[in-house]
Every structure is written in structure tokens, then in C-alpha cells.
Image: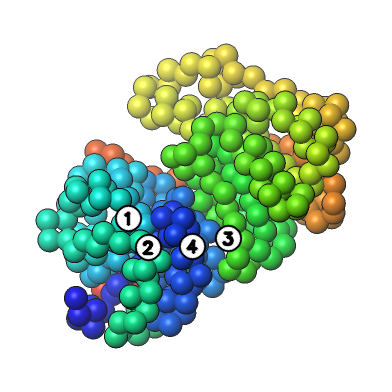
Amino acid sequence: MNYKDFKKPVLLVGSGVRAAGAAGLVVEFALKTNIPVLTTMNAVDVAQGDLRVGMMGTYGNRWSNMILENCDLVISVGARLGLRQIGHKKEWFAPKAKLVRADVDQAELSRNVKDDEEKHLIDARDFIVSLLATDFPDCTEWKRRCLAVKDMLAKYDNTEGNDAVEAIADLLPENPVCAIDIGQHQCWCAQSLALKGHDGRILIGGGYGSMGCGLPYSIGASISRNNGLVYCITGDGGLQMNIQELETVVREKLPIKIIVINNHVLGKISEIQHGSYDDRYAQTTAESGYSVPDFKKIAEAYGIKAATIPSYRELKNYKEWFTDGDPCLINMFLDPDTLLIPKIKWETGLIMPLLEGGLNKKVLSLLNFE
């Protein structure tokens, strides 16, 4: 393929890039070409710092999905391009773009996303090495436009959940290790947990884990790094699944910083019950049979210093806790009605809620150029 024929390419990376040990090569290629890098949820930590454009897919950043709608080439490496990434109607995915897919799994490549796609059965690392050797166009102007759209929409979809995650990110040191549980907060983190530096890790469950994986992930990550500092971002539902592992944290003297985004609901499930089942809640809200203990008291019973704060705005008062050598738990309240947006609507492929006013026209004027 002659990559010089394309003016608006994007590099889409999945967790296969990390598995192949090719994350550093992605950074090298992105710096060399200025190509915009989009990630799947499982690969959000591959492109961080000034290389972070955004995450795509059902719960992806709005600007990322709009960039995909208007680009002319998608180079997908180590991403399986499943339903949560491309939707249930394949023709809606990157409709104006040529698709190049590189994957080590023949079974994934056996199904077509586009009829005319170019497929490479190859290790992600080898494929990116080959990309580095190609005569690839300079994407500086295209990336500038993509980042302008990102800046324009950066706060448009922010809910209290996104604001809380951004407040956490502001307090993290450079290149931290973060373990994320499953729930609404998982998607808020994938959308908004922008790490400083290029070498941090976001250990995110994606399709691999279930609720409760955040604390065990943190324990494993800390032990593997000689009892290193790890940040666990979890929800009130997820923490209750493996709360007994607080004893492991204490016994092994692990400096794990546990931030509980506590909205007193099983948010991901209750949103579905709200949107698809006419508010017929079942065991997901306080009124329908779900309850939350006092996490501060529980942590202190295990010998872990803890605090309960009414809002993410109080998080800065515990800045020192983020960098000392002791485990801690911060129980941070969130409005139970905080929604997870934007979301690609299954039936229509539209990004909900719709853009208001003249924003859509302004975005398209940036993304459409010759």
C-alpha cells in the first residue's frame, strides 16, 4: 500500500500492541509521523501524555469517534475490532476510510469488517517495525485539527464522574501504575484518566475482568514491583466483591492507594435498567435492594488509614496520601444520578447526547479538508 495516498490516517492500537512489547514502537512511530493515535479501552495506556488523542468505541471519547467517522485510513494493530469497538453495523465504522488490519490471531482476521480491507497476519511488533521503515506522510496538520476538535469538545460530555477522575489524575505522579475495577468508573477512567509521562500503566479490566478485579490487580501489580506504589480506582460495588483483600494489603505492607468512587448504586447496571427497562430497578439502587457499608470504618478496622469526602473537590486535601509509603483508602462520594456519557446508541449508531448548536458544523469543518 502507498501510504502517501492518504491525508487523514489514524493509528488504532489495541492491547495486542502491549502484549507484543510494542508500546515503545508506537510512541516512536507517532513521534516520527505525527499520526493521531486512538486506542481501544484495553490499550488506553499505550498512548499517554502529549500522544494521547483518545479512546474509541461504545463509551469512547466523542472526538475519537468523530475522527474515525471522517478519516481516510485506519491502521488497526492488535485490536480485534469487536462489537464494543465498531458497533453492530459494520458499515457505520470509519465509513470514509480504507482499513488495514494487523493481528496475530487468524480467527479475528477471518471475519471482515470491511469488504476491501487489507489484512496482515503478523505480530504487532513486527508490523510496527515495518511501518517505521515505510515512506509515511507527515500528519502534522491533520493531527493539529484532531487536537483542535479534542480541545473544543474536552468538557462537553464531562459528568461528575469524569471530573472526579480528572481530579485523581492531577494528583498522580509521573508514570504511575493504576489498577481499575469494573463499573461506570472504568469507563470514566478510560475516557479521562490522562497520565503524565509515557511509561505509566493503566491496568484495566476491559473484557478480561469482572467486578472486584481492581484490588487484586493492585496487589499483584505492587508485589510484582517489589511492593511498589499502586493506585486502585474502584467503585462501591466492585470493592465489596473482594473487600477481604484489604487484609492482604496490610499483611504484605503494600503501599496501595485505594480511591473509591462511591455513588451508592451499581451504576452500569442501573443505567441499563433506567434506559431500557423503564426504571424497573432491581438490586442496583438503595430503593431496589442495594446498600453500601461505611468503607472508612472497614478500612480502619483492617489498620488502613482512611477518609470519607463528600466530593472530588476535597481530594486535594489528601495530596500527601498519594505519595507516602502507606496504604490508604479515600471514600469519595458521587451523585447517584451521574450518567456515563457519551455513548454510541446501539440502534442508530449516533453518539448520544447529540451535539447542540453549531458545534457539529465547527467540528466537521476542522475534520474535513483536502
Mark whose residue sits in front, 3 or 4: 4
The answer to the question of whether label 3 and label 2 lie on touching residues, with beta carbons closer than 8 A, is no
The percent coordinates of residue 105 (x first, y second) are 30, 51
Q: Is residue 161 visible?
A: no
The crowd level at tag 2 (other Cα within 10 Å; few <14, some 14-19, many 20+) is many
The crowd level at tag 3 (other Cα within 10 Å; few <14, some 14-19, many 20+) is many
The answer to the question of whether label 2 and label 1 lie on touching residues, with beta carbons closer than 8 A, is yes
Residue 210 sits above or below residue 172 on the image: above
Q: Earlier in the sequence, mark 3 or mark 1?
A: 1
The percent coordinates of residue 286 (x first, y second) are 60, 19
The percent coordinates of residue 2 (x first, y second) are 20, 80
> What is the secondary structure assignment of the residue under circle 4?
loop
Front-lying residue, 155 or 165: 165
Q: Mark 1: which amino acid?
A: Val
> What is the secondary structure assignment of the residue under circle 2?
helix
Q: Mark 4: which amino acid?
A: Gly
Q: Residue at x 36, y 50 (%)?
A: 57
Left or right: where does residue 133 sit relative to residue 326? Answer: left
Q: CA distance from mark 2 to mark 4?
A: 8 Å
Mark whose residue sits in front, 3 or 2: 2
Left or right: where does residue 346 sit relative to residue 145? Answer: left
Q: Earlier in the sequence, mark 2 or mark 1?
A: 1
Q: Earlier in the sequence, mark 2 or mark 4?
A: 4
Residue 127 sits above or below residue 280 on the image: below
Q: CA distance from mark 3 to mark 4?
A: 21 Å
Q: Which residue is mark 1?
A: 104
Q: Mark 2: which amino acid?
A: Ala
Q: Which residue is mark 3?
A: 194
Q: CA distance from mark 2 to mark 1?
A: 7 Å
Tell me the number on the disc at residue 124: 2
Q: Earlier in the sequence, mark 1 or mark 4?
A: 4
Q: Which residue is mark 4?
A: 21
